[in-house]
């Protein structure tokens, strides 16, 4: 088999979003792309607990910016301190200027950011992000 045409293994994914509907929609879109190893958390603090319980960190993390208890910006700081090795996608249903600030903070702390988007994250965008990994 030609190595260039060989498919990459599907990444494991952690979805961090306080909105249950958004988590479910993302999970369905990822499953439609063949991804079966999907974990979910409803804020940054619960995501940290999920990461600690995993044998190895997920290759991809999709994170909302605005969440109660620990928001996405605080969570990015924690990821940077723990030297999270995977890729991150930031999403928000709120204003674009805060998304831009979150993106700048994440990249400034060494997070490998694949992109930042307003909700809903469209299926074609998600497909492109997965292909770019």
Image (cartoon, rainbow, N blue to C red):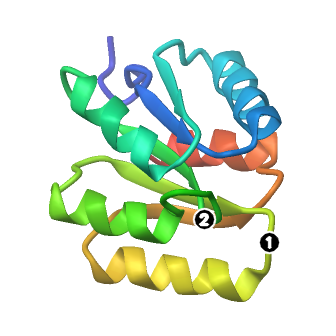
Which comes before the other along the chain, label 1 or label 2?
2
CB under 8 Å between callouts 1 and 2?
yes
Vertical side of 5 occupied by 110: above or below = below
Per the rendering, the mark at residue 65 is 2
Relative to 88, 57 lies left or right: left
Q: At 23% across and 51% down in the image, what residue appears?
A: 84
Image position, residue 115 (x, y; %): 55, 64
Q: At 28% across and 61% down in the image, what residue appears?
A: 78
Bin the neighbour count of mark 1 within 10 Å (Cα to Cα): few under 14, some 14-19, many 20 and up.
few
Q: Quadrant of the N terminus?
A: top left
Q: Quadrant of the C terminus?
A: top left
Image position, residue 92 (x, y; %): 71, 64
Q: Is residue 94 visible?
A: yes
In the depicted view, which residue is nearer to us: 119 or 29? 119
Vertical side of 1 occupied by 117: above or below = below
Residue 111, by quadrant, is bottom left
Relative to 45, 110 lies left or right: left
Measure how far apart labels 1 and 2 are at the Cα level.
9 Å
Image position, residue 94 (x, y; %): 80, 72
Image position, residue 68 (x, y; %): 61, 57
Q: Is residue 58 visible?
A: no
Helix, strand or loop at label 1? It is: loop
Helix, strand or loop at label 2? It is: loop
Residue 110, by quadrant, is bottom left
According to the picture, the residue beneath numbered tag 1 turns out to be: 94
């Amino acid at each position: 088999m030609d190595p260039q045409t060989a498919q990459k293994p599907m990444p494991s994914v952690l979805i961090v979003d306080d909105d249950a509907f958004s988590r479910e929609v993302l999970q369905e879109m990822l499953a439609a792309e063949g991804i079966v190893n999907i974990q979910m958390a409803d804020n940054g603090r619960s995501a940290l607990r999920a990461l600690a319980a995993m044998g190895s960190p997920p290759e991809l993390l999709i994170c909302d910016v605005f969440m109660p208890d620990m928001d996405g910006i605080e969570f990015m700081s924690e990821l940077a301190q723990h030297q999270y090795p995977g890729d991150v996608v930031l999403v928000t249903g709120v204003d674009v200027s805060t998304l831009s600030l979150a993106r700048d903070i994440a990249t400034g702390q060494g997070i490998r950011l694949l992109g930042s988007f307003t909700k809903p994250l469209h299926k074609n965008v998600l497909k492109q992000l997965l292909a770019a990994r």
